[in-house]
Every structure is written in structure tokens, then in C-alpha cells.
Amino acid sequence: MLFSPRKFGTLVEGIAQRINARFPPLVANNPERTVSEKRIEEILEETFAAALQSERENEIGFLGRARLRNALKRQLREIGYDEQFVDFAAGKLIEQLTRGAE
């Protein structure tokens, strides 16, 4: 998949904003949070599916997935998520992209 820099930035920002709206850093970074890992996975999967829906026709190659993963990690760090959640979310993004490519 080839993204223009503007479209790529808009996509990553949109994903990060949707995550922030549904699972803000205040909740995500709280070690005593009451949100289960399964629910967090559901939130991430729903968020990624909605954001990537229009990109389904295009195949996202290895470099595209790596670029999206790294950009999402940067964006989530800027919003204020801790590194554990950033890695978890980025991993789930790659899982979803890989699943969609099959």
C-alpha cells in the first residue's frame, strides 16, 4: 500500500484519537485498572477495523505494516500512553493487518 504522507498521517492520527477516546491514558496507565485485557483487545480490534476499512482493497506489505506500527507507537507515546500499552497496541495492529492480508 502506498500512502501519501498526508493520508498516512491522517490515518495514524485517526487511529490514535479513536484509541484515546475509547481507552484514555488515564485508564490505560493505571496499574489498578478494572478493564480486562480481553476488553482492551476488543477496543483495539474494533478501532483498527473501522480505521482501516477503506484500505482493505489495498494490500499492506511488510514495509507498510512496519511504517504504520512505528508511527502509531510514536503517536500513542505523544498522547501519554505508557510503553507497555504502546507495544501491546502496536502488536495488535500488526496482528489485524496480517489477518486482513490472508
Image: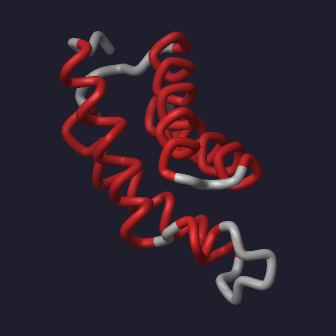
Which picture quadrant has residue 93?
top right
- Residue 39 in the image, given as x and y percentages of width and height: 59, 77
Does 5 sit above or below residue 38?
above
Q: Is residue 37 left or right of residue 5?
A: right
Colour scheme in use: secondary structure
Does 16 sit above or below residue 68?
below
Residue that appears at 70% across and 53% down: 82
Q: Is residue 22 left or right of residue 83?
A: left
- Residue 21 in the image, given as x and y percentages of width and height: 37, 68
Residue that appears at 60% across and 65% down: 41
- Residue 65 in the image, given as x and y percentages of width and height: 51, 23
Q: Residue furthest bottom?
A: 34
In the image, 25 versus 22, the foreground residue is 25
Quadrant in which the N terminus appears: top left
Task: Please give the count of numbered marks on the rendered protein.
Answer: 0
- Residue 55 in the image, given as x and y percentages of width and height: 25, 32
Residue that appears at 60% across and 76% down: 27
Q: Residue furthest right?
A: 31
Q: Is residue 10 left or right of residue 64?
A: left
In the image, 34 versus 45, the foreground residue is 34
Residue that appears at 39% across and 58% down: 47
